[in-house]
Amino acid sequence: MDNLTNSQWISLIVPLLIVQLILIAVALTVLVKADRTRGPKWLWAIVIVLVNLLGPIAFFLFGRRSD
Amino acid sequence: MKQWFVLFNKEWLEILRSYRIIWLPIGFIVLGASQPIATFFMPDILASAGNMPEGAVIRIPTPQPFEVMAGALSQFGVIGLLLVALSGMGAISGEKASGTAAMVLVKPVSHVSFVTAKWAALLLLAVLSFAAGYGAAWYYTASLFDSVGWGEVVQSALLFALWLGFVGTLALLFSSLLRSAAAATFGALATAAVLSIASSSLPFEQSWNPGRLSGLAAESLNAGAASPGDGQGAVWLTVIVTATAMLAALAASARSLKRMPSND
């Protein structure tokens, strides 16, 4: 951590955070718009926000009902 | 050929609608980027983790840049493979269960183009996602450690993409053979795991084993080593065997679809 300046540090971490936030935002939008989900919506919201990376992916795979 | 593109477009639309186009690349990018970052901060993480006696000195040699990239590849080899297999989950078994496959296939559509269009769309998505993730790993490795040469990165990416494609093809094959999407995913991952463990632990020569590919990809990152594995010829043999196995798997799944286009 010593040989990185603050702005270098930010320029490395911020893109990674933004990408993850996009994933969470899209998952939450789909969740809110969905008529029905497999399992309660509030539980999926918690999973999407709290489980890093795999939470939103699990929602896309298992949470949506296509019918 | 025109018909094939119609089917391919349908598959691609399905990929957009199921949001796979978003989560698969992001999954790979996060995996690829977090490996160099975690490696870079490992000394700090260990120091703050506690449980160290007072005055303990840990010396971790700074890893070579190609070792960091190889670490990212091994992440892709575990979680990345899982994501690819999950993204292809139910590709054919779902269509069989819902009756879509039977409905499409009563029309004069060849089974081969039905299967290959699916296969091409799945593999295109997987390869694009892997390229994005590997690009992220490369960028982070170059900014935190040191750069890795173009030639080595491209060679290892091609080898690893072939391995991903092989596992994706297996997922498609099992999806056409088995009813349950979960069983198909498990079958593909288990086959991949057995091949890859066999290639690294069995004592005899296995130039034919596709499971070698991920190891070869990691080795070919090291510019210092002469040539990966047991020479260029053995690498080509692995590549050819893998490609043949993929063709055979496609033929087998087209055949199984022809015999049983729906579950009932």
Image: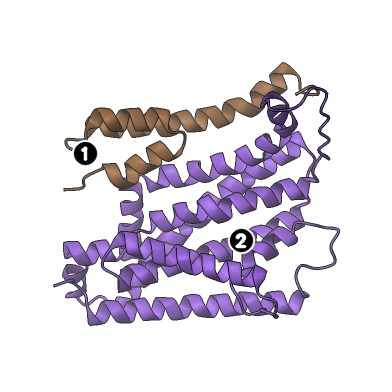
Chain colours: A brown, B purple
Q: Chain of mark 2?
A: B
Q: Are marks 2 and 1 on the same chain?
A: no
Q: Which residue reaches farthest left? A: B264
> What amino acid is at disc 1?
Thr
Query: Residue at position x 72%, y 46% from top?
Result: B68
Residue A37: mark: 1
Q: Quadrant of residue B231?
A: bottom right
Q: Which residue reaches farthest top? A: A6
Quadrant the N terminus of chain B occupies: bottom left
Query: Residue at position x 78%, y 38% from top?
Result: B145
Q: Nearer the viewer, residue B246 or B191?
A: B191
Q: Residues within 10 Å of mark 1 (few under 14, many from 20)?
A: some
Residue B242: mark: none
Q: Nearer the viewer, residue B184 or B242?
A: B184
Query: Residue at position x 18%, y 71% from top?
Result: B263
Query: Residue at position x 46%, y 33% from top?
Result: A52
- For label 2, the residue is B160
Image coords of residue A17 (percent x, y): 53, 28
> What amino acid is at disc 2?
Phe
Image coords of residue B10 (percent x, y): 30, 58
Q: Nearer the viewer, residue B94 or B57?
A: B57
* Callout 2 touching callout 1 (CB < 8 Å): no
Q: Nearer the viewer, residue B134 or B80?
A: B80
Residue B77 appears anywhere in the view: yes
Q: Residues within 10 Å of mark 2 (few under 14, many from 20)?
A: many
